[in-house]
Image: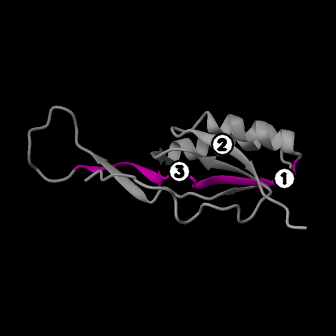
Amino acid sequence: MKGRVRGPATSGNYIAYGQYALQAQGHDRVTSRQIEASRQAMTRYIKRGGKIWIRIFPHTPVTKKPVGLKMGGGKGSPEFYVAKVKPGTILFEMEGVKEEVAKEAMRLAGHKLSVKTKFIVRETNQ
């Protein structure tokens, strides 16, 4: 069953490792292909500078049955994997680069995802 992704994120909703982060603004299922495309876009833009953390993992298998098959015959085989994302979930974190570079890299990564995103910066406690 598909189920629903409801409510705000209660875990994984704070910046844990880096200085800058990409935060989800809506509910959606993010596929492993989207995560990889985002990672590639970020690493290409920052050109081997800084460090990137991926805070989501596609645990959930999505099954599919072939087109034109009759009803019954059990569940389909897993086609791809998704990460269920809620509003407030931190998707990616980055440090070791300037804020403008991080912002542009995260913007490029956000375009690869199926969920609306927002760039955030860690508050410094002084």
Image x and y of residue 88, in percent: 58, 53
Instruction: Decide whether residue 85 is among the magenta residues.
Output: yes
Q: Nearer the viewer, residue 68 or 19?
A: 19
Q: Nearer the viewer, residue 126 or 58?
A: 126
The residue to which callout 3 is attached is 87
The residue to which callout 2 is attached is 118
| Element on which disc 2 rests | strand
Image x and y of residue 100, in percent: 85, 39
Instruction: Decide whether residue 109 is among the magenta residues.
Output: no
Image x and y of residue 73, in percent: 10, 50
Query: Going from the N terminus, do you reach mark 2 or mark 3 first?
Result: 3
Residue found 69% across the figure and 34% down from its top: 108
Bounds of the magenta span?
Answer: 76-97
Q: Identify the image quadrant of the C terminus.
A: bottom right
The residue to which callout 1 is attached is 50
Q: Amino acid at mark 3?
A: Pro
Most prominent secondary structure in the magenta stretch? strand
Query: In this rendering, would 102 be left or right of 5?
Result: right
Query: Going from the N terminus, do you reach mark 3 or mark 1 first?
Result: 1
- Check whether the beta carbons of the residues at disc 3 and disc 1 lie within 8 A of each other: no
Image x and y of residue 71, in percent: 8, 42
